[in-house]
Image: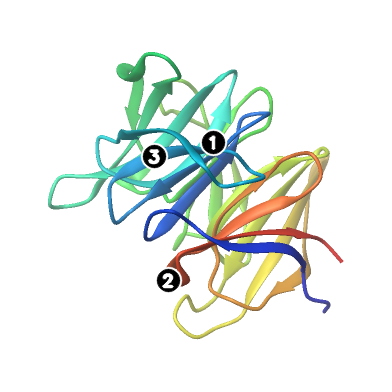
Amino acid sequence: MQEIRETSRRATPFPKPQSVAFDGSSLWIGSVATSKIYRLNPDTLTVGFETAAPGKPWGMAAMNGELRVICGETEEDNRFVRRFVPGSGFTRSGDFQCPDDTGSQLSFDGSRLYVSQWYKKRLLAVDDKGNVQDTIEIPHGVCGQTFANGAFYVLTTDDEAAGDYWITRVQRNGSYKVEDIAHVSFPARALAYDGKHFWTNHREADQIVSFELP
């Protein structure tokens, strides 16, 4: 299996980048060290805005001009999906607890939000109250996801500490076709797509990476 083709690898201006989303012009990255989300210029990585999140921002997706952020909150790391409105901030309207109180990443397919459950190896389509509408089984643990060009692209691994990482594509045509299509050579976290490149984080190296598929 071929490797992804990295197009850039740069240091983030804050430690432990974890979640990533692209809103059409800006990158949004959440740090689990600072518990903040940041809006970055993708060309320069200059921070244009930052704000505290309600908890550790584990996952993030752009959705209809807003953001949805999975936050780990309380000492028990309870997982909630929080709504962020640019210009207004985080609001309790539209928030819900993740199904089974677990969730690591988010994506939006244009009509529905998807919460990933890393260790249960699945994506869950949810409504605006967090009720599960559909389930997509994934053959590996899920540590990133995005929707692009009519398919889900999922960052996956079987061993987060020492194992291989892959890009797994999920195509819908009546049923779901799931296949590993590229190898990732580092322990990546989160996934976003800007229309040309994919973006992910090398969290432990404090780096953000853009890449193309082979």
Query: How many discs appear?
Result: 3
Locate the C terminus by quadrant. Answer: bottom right
In the rendered structure, which disc, 3 or 2, sits on the residue that comes first in sequence? 3
Which residue, as the protein is rendered here, is positioned at the far left?
75
Mark carried by residue 4 = none
The Cα–Cα distance between marks 3 and 1, rounded to whole angstroms, is 12 Å
Tag 3: amino acid: Ile
User: Which label's residue is closer to the chain start, 3 or 1?
Assistant: 3
Residue 191 lies, in percent from the top left, at 61, 51
Give the residue at x 79% y 39%: 195
Residue drawn at 42 percent across, 14 percent down:
87
Badge 2, how many Cα within 10 Å: few under 14, some, many 20+?
A: some
**Of the residues shown, which amino acid type is indicated by label 1?**
Ala
**Residue 94 vertical placement versus 146 (above, below):** above
For mark 1, what is the residue? Answer: 61
Q: Determine the CA span between mark 2 and mark 1.
A: 21 Å
* Residue closest to the far bottom: 162
| Label pair 2/1, CB-CB below 8 angstroms | no
As helix, strand or loop, the secondary structure at mark 2 comes to helix
Which residue matches tag 3? Answer: 37
Picture quadrant where residue 82 is located:
top left
Q: Which residue is mark 2?
A: 204
| Colouring rule applied to residues | rainbow
Residue 170 pos. (x, y %): 75, 51
Quarter-wise, where is residue 157 in the image?
A: bottom right
Q: Is residue 189 above or below residue 158?
A: above
Give residue 194's position: percent from left, percent from top.
Answer: 72, 40
Secondary-structure class at tag 3: strand
Q: Residues within 10 Å of mark 1 (few under 14, many from 20)?
A: many
The amino acid beneath tag 2 is Glu
Tell me the distance, in whole angstroms, between the alpha carbons under discs 3 and 2: 17 Å
Image depth: mark 3 or mark 1 in front: 3
